[in-house]
Image (cartoon, rainbow, N blue to C red):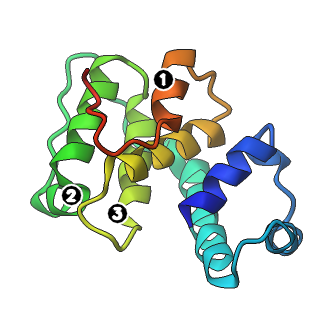
Amino acid sequence: MFDVLVYLYENYGAFEACPDASSLGRSLADAGFDDDEIREALAWLQGLARIVEDAGDLPLESGTSLRVYTPTELDQLGPAAVGFLIYLDSARQLSPRQREIVIERALAITDSPLSIATIKIIVLMVLWSHSADVDFLLLEELLDDDDETHAMH
C-alpha cells in the first residue's frame, strides 16, 4: 500500500490533482500495482480526505501545549514513530492539526508498531494533502526509506 502512496506523491503534483477513485484505480493497475494494494491505498486516502475535511473541528493548541499519547497510541505507533513525531513537533514541521491527522491515519494501519519508513510516508501524505510547502531537508528525510535512520541524527 505504501508503494502506491509514494507513487501517487511522485506522479501527481497535488492531492487534489488525483483523479476519481475508479480512474485512479485503473491508472495504478496500469502502473503494475496489484488490486489489494490499490484497494487498501484508495481506502486509506479516502480516510485521509475525510479527516482533512473535518480537521477544522480539531482544537487548536497553544504554543506551550504538550501532546500526551494514550497507551493505545503508544502501542500502535511504537517508540520510534512517537519519537519522530516529537522531533517534527519540536522542529515545527507539522502543525498540531497535521500531527493529529498523522496520528489518526497511523492508527488506521493494522501493523504495529509502525516503522519509521511507514510514519514518514504518512507524514508525507498528510503534508501533501494540505498542499504544504515541505522544507527540502524534511522532504529528503521523509523520502529516505532507511529504517535504521534515526530521526534526530
> In this picture, is 132 found above or below 84?
above
What separation in Å lies between label 2 and label 1 (alpha carbons)? 24 Å
Residue at 14 percent across and 55 percent down: it is 70
The amino acid type found where label 3 is placed reads: Leu
Q: Earlier in the sequence, mark 2 or mark 3?
A: 2
Q: Nearer the viewer, residue 99 or 153?
A: 153
> In this picture, is 67 found above or below 134?
below
The residue labelled by disc 1 is 138
Residue at 28 percent across and 41 percent down: it is 148
Kind of element beneath mark 3: helix
Q: Earlier in the sequence, mark 2 or mark 1?
A: 2
Kind of element beneath mark 1: helix
Answer with the quarter of the image where residue 30 lies: bottom right
The residue labelled by disc 3 is 107
Closer to the eye: label 3 or 1: 1
> In this picture, is 38 found above or below 6?
below
The amino acid type found where label 2 is placed reads: Glu
Q: Residues within 10 Å of mark 3 (few under 14, many from 20)?
A: some
Pointers 3 and 1 in contact (CB under 8 A)? no
The residue labelled by disc 2 is 73
What separation in Å lies between label 2 and label 3 (alpha carbons)? 7 Å
Taking the image as shown, residue 73 lies to the left or right of residue 15, namely left
Q: Quadrant of the C terminus?
A: top left
The amino acid type found where label 1 is placed reads: Leu
Residue at 64 percent across and 65 percent down: it is 46
Q: Earlier in the sequence, mark 3 or mark 1?
A: 3
Counting from the top left corner in percent of width and height, residue 39 is at 65, 78
Pointers 2 and 3 in contact (CB under 8 A)? yes
